[in-house]
Amino acid sequence: MTAALSLPKPARLVLADGTIFRGTAQGASAVAAGELCFNTSMTGYQEILSDPSYAGQLVTMTAPEIGNVGTNPEDDESRRPFLRGFIVKELFAEPSNYRAQESLPAYLERFGIPAISGLDTRALVRRIRDQGFQNAALSTDPAKQDEAELLALARSAAPLEEQDLVAEVTCEASYEWKEGGWKGIEGQLPPAAVPAPQLRVVAYDFGVKRNILRLLVEHGFDVTVVPATTSAEEVRALSPDAVFLSNGPGDPAAVQGVREHVRALSQEYPMFGICLGHQILGLALGGRTRKLKFGHHGGNQPGKDLATGKVAICAENHGYAVEADSLREAGEPVEITHVNLNDDTVEGLAHQERPLFSVQYHPEASPGPHDVRYFFERFRTMTLRHKAGETVSGAQISKGN
């Protein structure tokens, strides 16, 4: 007797503007609503899935085939995925890779993430690109496919700017991070050498990616990760040499209470921020942020270093940007160090008098690109010089001085 065929289950994606996409259910059987975005990376889908910066969002992949290398624990960037749903053209259920330990459908189901495949992702991405961010509802539950109900859910879902998503993804308690980067399967290669820590850094967890922590360790930092709610007084009690501000999800202006602590600490310690950390540093220095039309999400964004004129290919994942004029109006001696060549948005900041700098993109990106990993060495150099009693500014470091 032959086994009965398993028929595909229906799924619906309903946009707040009334557009309906029909496809095949993947992952968990569930209903979810959130903000639609798209990611243009050709690979690295597990990093995208496990990046806490996607909390509150439904992520569409522009690459047509997803899941072919499966998933493995080493490539997770956080304790679990925080995105609301996943949207792909074609999803592979049987991975082909020597590192794969679990298929992508099984990974999604284990973490309760609904996904849809088999729809026209090109048409969906064009709609997001042309009309901008909007909310949508996704159902992979066969019993909950009523399109009118899903439309109502999409239209009633709270926008990102009304949610403090950092509170959802940050750690509950502080912890030490000791692990360096992955260097190969255990037993096949000699253990990777990790330098003895020379500097103590407190890393604010706004949704921090593990590869950031790995690279801090590899650059000689003794890393203590603290929740987003940690006060300036609690950070001082840890006697750090520097403070790091991590990536994270949502609207930086919606994060409660953080900018005041960052403002105080920025007067005392060297500070480096990535993505949301960059935006929060901008807010702490008196700037403003604004929402972009459809954001920057992918591994192929062009970031120009204004000091050298060089352009790097960068990984980015953000829907908000620091307003350049607001920093000038605030009166702080801050200079813009990097811009995105697609739309001229601010991609980097540096203080002209204090050891502070930040970047909007992701120098830690895994699997890449790795064009801008030098920022971790800049942070180390700036912290060492400050610890030695030298007067050093973020602007000096950004210019290689």
Image: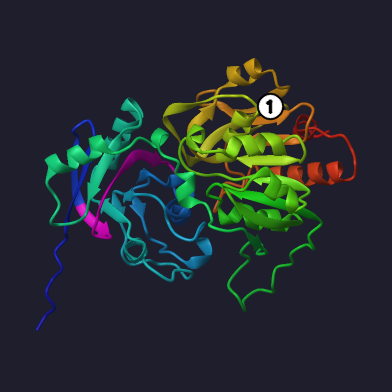
Q: Is residue 359 visible?
A: no
Work out which quarter of the rendered image holds the C terminus and state it. top right
Q: Residue at x 33, y 26 (%)?
A: 130
Q: Quadrant of residue 270?
A: top right
Residue at 79% x, 27% y: name it.
353
Is residue 96 placed above or below 54 in the rendered structure? below
Residue 331 location in percent, x, y?
A: 69, 18
State the residue in front, 310 or 109.
109
Would residue 319 be found to the left or right of residue 341 on screen? Answer: left
Residue 37 locus on image (x, y percent): 37, 39
Give the residue at the far right of this rendering: 389
Examine the image and state in which quarter residue 196 appears: bottom right
Total marks in image: 1
Q: What residue lies at 44% left-to-right and 27% top-to-bottom?
A: 292
Residue 394 shown left or right of residue 121 in the figure: right
Relative placement, left or right, of 341 versus 29 is: right
Does the rendering let one see residue 83?
yes
Where the N terminus falls, by quadrant? bottom left
Q: Position of residue 83 (x, y in %)?
A: 39, 50
Task: Verify whether residue 343 appears in magenta.
Answer: no
* Residue 39 is a magenta residue: yes
Q: Check the image and report above or below for 93 versus 20.
A: below
What residue does disc 1 label?
A: 309
Magenta region, residue range: 24-41
Q: SS for tag 1?
A: loop
Q: Residue at x 29, y 55 (%)?
A: 114
